[in-house]
Image: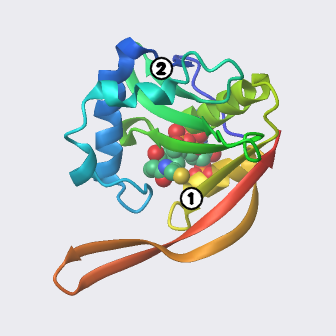
Amino acid sequence: MAGTDQSVRIARIAPADLSAYKGLRDEALRLYPDAFDADIESEQARPPESYLGRLGLGETLGGTFLLGAWDGRELVGMIGLERQTQHKLRHGAELNSMMVHPRHTGRGIGILLIQAAIQEARQAIGLEQVVLRVSTSSASAIRLYERAGFQSCGVVPHAIKLIDGPGQVRYFDKLTMTLIL
Ligand SMILES: CC(C)(COP(=O)(O)OP(=O)(O)OC[C@H]1O[C@@H](n2cnc3c(N)ncnc32)[C@H](O)[C@@H]1OP(=O)(O)O)[C@@H](O)C(=O)NCCC(=O)NCCS
């Protein structure tokens, strides 16, 4: 692993941070439409408080949270984990929302975020596995997940369909990866 940046602090995103989270999230949706399932047009009008459920507050077993990477007072990266709620599925959680602002990539923040998320996931009671879906176009993200121990399970072809204009369609495949905690 390349050297990680000691000036960056990884911490859970709290209710007071939701405006910063929303700002970074909207930027991610705008910059990387192929990397995320949500689209900026549908999400940008959502108020920051609407993401409160993603913080997992009051969930006694753990396994649902958002982590932020802070460079001073600036939120420069994020990652999320969302635990399944149905009885037969709640030993699993989905990793999502992984993004480092392009001004701060290549500093080791991505690997710090994944490692912190895995560490936090291991504290959750009864959580056994983490699953994620990543666009095959996100080569840097796939390398990070592999470095963190995730294994590839298979590809869904044409999982993302982007319509750029009349007759201008792009498809992106999604790779499913899993980590046993
Ligand atoms: C994927 C993403 C999160 C990576 O974040 P990042 O902070 O750049 O990640 P890191 O810095 O830990 O690693 C990125 C690269 O920089 C290298 N690097 C890290 N620290 C370094 C350092 N100090 N010196 C030189 N290189 C370094 C890593 O080895 C890695 O190299 P690789 O891409 O050749 O494997 C970021 O590029 C991103 O937000 N992409 C768009 C959104 C996206 O695809 N998200 C995934 C959704 S599933």
Image position of 133 with respect to 6: above or below: below
Q: In the image, what residue occupies the spot 75% across and 25% down?
A: 124
The residue wearing badge 2 is 13
Name the residue type under label 1: Val
Q: Is residue 107 visible?
A: no
Q: Quadrant of residue 46?
A: top left
Residue 178 seen in this snapshot? yes
Q: Earlier in the sequence, mark 2 or mark 1?
A: 2
Rendered image: mark on residue 167: none
Q: Amino acid at mark 2?
A: Ile
Q: Quadrant of ligand 1?
A: top right
For the C terminus, give its image quadrant.
top right
Q: Position of 129 compared to 159: left or right?
A: right
Q: Is residue 122 above or below residue 9?
A: below
Q: Which residue is mark 1?
A: 134
Camera-side residue: 95 or 144? 95
